[in-house]
Amino acid sequence: MIARLIGRSMFAALLAVASVAANAAVPTEFRVTSDGSAFYPAQPLRKGDRLQVLSPYLIDHDSLFLMRCVDGCQRSEIVRSWNGRVGGTGPAMLESVTLQQDGEYFFVPRTFSLSLQHRNLQACVSLLRLHEMCEDASAMTIREVKATPELFRVRLQSGSWIWVRRTAAGPVPATPSLPANATS
């Protein structure tokens, strides 16, 4: 209990520092899929958009994948992954990712069973470091949503909370202008 309180207070301090250091949040609407297996921004994101991903407490075997649609969402690729044990994120996490391509993005939560054999668990953890999804990872559903234009929060079935906000917007593509002598 005390460790959890200390973790939350450290997280609050991290969030305060990040709020001052980063640009103000860019209002962004997020939606949850009908089956509760993923969430995504309502509008496609642009190259240069910066997403801040926060978790006041990410349970050890939970992971979150940021995916980008490819070929009209016939396929997807992993852009970034986070886990409570991987990459030194620990139980409290605060990280940002700057998108390198325009497109439709979505977040997928997964968990690893504690009953996985040690060898399989190590293999899954290794794949996370490479931003690849382990086939032994199980889907998790989103149990609760708290949303404002500046911050989107979801509670997963495991109890982990994930917060996402966009802190910078990429450049708006230029609209081609018509030549001065163009007629309608």
Image (cartoon, rainbow, N blue to C red):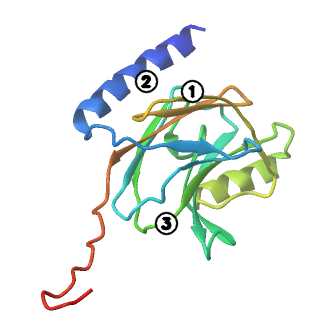
C-alpha distance separating marks 1 and 3: 29 Å
- The residue beneath circle 2 is 11
Estimate the x, y position of residue 74 in percent, counting from the top left: 69, 72
State the SS at label 2: helix
> Who comes first in sequence, dot 3 or dot 2?
2
Instruction: Give the number of the mark in front: 1 or 3.
Output: 3
Q: Quadrant of the C terminus?
A: bottom left
Q: Is residue 6 above or below residue 119?
A: above
State the SS at label 3: loop
Identity of the residue drawn at 33% across and 61% down: 48
Q: Is residue 112 above or below residue 11?
A: below
Query: What's the amino acid at mark 2?
Result: Phe
Q: Do the numbered discs 1 and 2 sit on residues whose CB atoms are within 8 Å?
A: yes
Estimate the x, y position of residue 59 in percent, counting from the top left: 65, 31
State the SS at label 1: loop
Query: What's the amino acid at mark 1?
Result: Tyr
- The residue beneath circle 1 is 57
Identity of the residue drawn at 64% across and 67% down: 76
- The residue beneath circle 3 is 103
Image disc number at residue 109: none
